[in-house]
Image (spheres, helix red, strand yellow):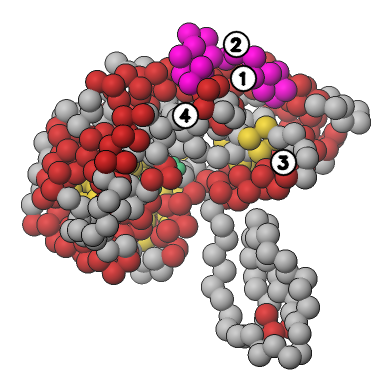
Amino acid sequence: MLASAASGTRTAADPSDTSDLSEPHDPHDPPEPSVPLRPVPLSPTLAVNEALARKRGAGASVLPLGFGEAGIPIHPALVRELSAAADRGAYGPVAGSAALRTAAAGYWERRGLPTDPDLVVAGPGSKALLFGLLAALGGDVVVPAPSWVTYAAQTELAGALPIRVATPPGEGGVPNPALLADAVVRARAVGRTVRAVVLTLPDNPTGTLARPETVARVCAAARDLDLVIICDEIYRDLVHDPAREVASAARYAPERTVVTTALSKQLAAGGWRIGVARLPHGPFGRALRASLVGIGSEIWSSPPAPMQHAAAYAFREPPELVEHVARSRRLHAAVATAVADRFRDAGALVRPPEAAFYVYPDLEPLRERLRAAHGVRTGADLTALLLDRYGVGVLPGSVFGDDPAALRMRVAPSLLYGDTDARRLAALDSADPAALPWIAGALDRLSAVLADVRARDRAPSAV
Ligand SMILES: Cc1ncc(COP(=O)(O)O)c(C=O)c1O
């Protein structure tokens, strides 16, 4: 929603736009363009972060539970590797260096997915690669409901439509296989071109992992429907129980599955912007690779060279990094479980978190109280109340494509680990991180907020 700038009364396209919109237009200035812009709102995960930053800047104390950042320090070995490559200023191959592609192939081989380095494409984050894939495929995309905000947004940016299919109960990240065929057949019957389905194993926003049987059924349906499967495994190494099997779609439908991952989550290097995609073997995979590389060549040219060097080191999985990932996994499990417990104690429905740093509580049992006390009718009403009154930043399920009326929200506790590296390291080292004073304090505040929110007919107390 952008009004003509020439009037001098622009309207912000999103609430996080902090530019001064009230600046009057000086009649001596040349006329500004009156070109209507395509409204592309800031990704909600980034927007909640910025809203919290503004509150914090205004002196308010906040509880940042909205942003999917891993919240742990970069391992010194990665810093060392990155520094060693800081003088690499050349562009390099679009698909990434042979060293990085070979290291990524080894990473996948160790997870039971034999990989040809020539079918690995690196890019500036897996997000950019996902967009390249969707643009290359060029059709509508089945996305689980709920699912990570970006799949639907990127599908629309690529000029197609997301087709949302509900996930099976307790298994986030995959469309219910019993509903998938029907949704695709109906879309095709009205003339839509449906080309792909996205899976997230394990899942953001629910923090759960689909069972191998379910993944196998989705893959069988995708084969029947001739869909390409994009299997986003960015949280693969953060399944809380390391003995639990992550069944990649590439195991069941290797001829049509693209797997993506990155260093952003297990090694907390999201700001480094480096990711990799594993394309299927065979003629289709090679053609898709050519398309993806072509798109990369026109948008990012090559992944950043120093990052590639550090990523090649990381994907070789030296023991020091394996140990670091194991410690971060234990930290995420402990704090996410503690947060889930606080919601359960407050009367919410919540599944035990299984992976990553997400909890997805449902406040449906409190609906009547929330309506009577605060006029809350939707998930967005609830999260607005939490943000505005209590400084608690979480995201409503609706931004992930969940039912807007549902009182579900995504809670991401990883920014509670500490506001200094010393605290984050202490959290990583602790056998009981939820008991550390700064984390326990945040958890107690969360409990106090939930208690206050559910209390009927009361003015808010100072929480
Ligand atoms: C499911 C999922 N995929 C991909 C990404 C982004 O990955 P990258 O940092 O590699 O672009 C995120 C980050 O929030 C995510 O949650």
Q: Residues within 10 Å of mark 4 (few under 14, many from 20)?
A: many
Between the C-alphas of marks 4 and 3, the distance is: 21 Å
SS class, disc 4: loop
The residue to which callout 3 is attached is 56
Tags 2 and 1 in contact by the CB under 8 Å rule?
yes
Amino acid bearing label 1: Ile
The residue to which callout 2 is attached is 435
Between the C-alphas of marks 2 and 1, the distance is: 7 Å
**335 w.r.t. 414: above or below:** above
Which residue is at 76% across, 73% downward?
23
The residue to which callout 4 is attached is 72
Between the C-alphas of marks 2 and 4, the distance is: 17 Å
Between the C-alphas of marks 1 and 3, the distance is: 18 Å
Between the C-alphas of marks 1 and 4, the distance is: 14 Å
Q: Is residue 178 left or right of residue 248?
A: right
Q: Is mark 3 within 8 Å of ligand 1?
A: no
Across and down, in percent, residue 138 comes to: 31, 65
Give the mark, 1 or 4, whose residue is nearer the N terminus: 4
* Magenta-tinted stretch: 425-446
Which residue is at 45% across, 51% downward?
150
Give the mark, 1 or 3, whose residue is nearer the N terminus: 3
Q: Ligand 1 sits in which quadrant? A: top left
Choose mark 2 or mark 4, whichever is in front: 4
Q: Is residue 375 left or right of residue 112?
A: right
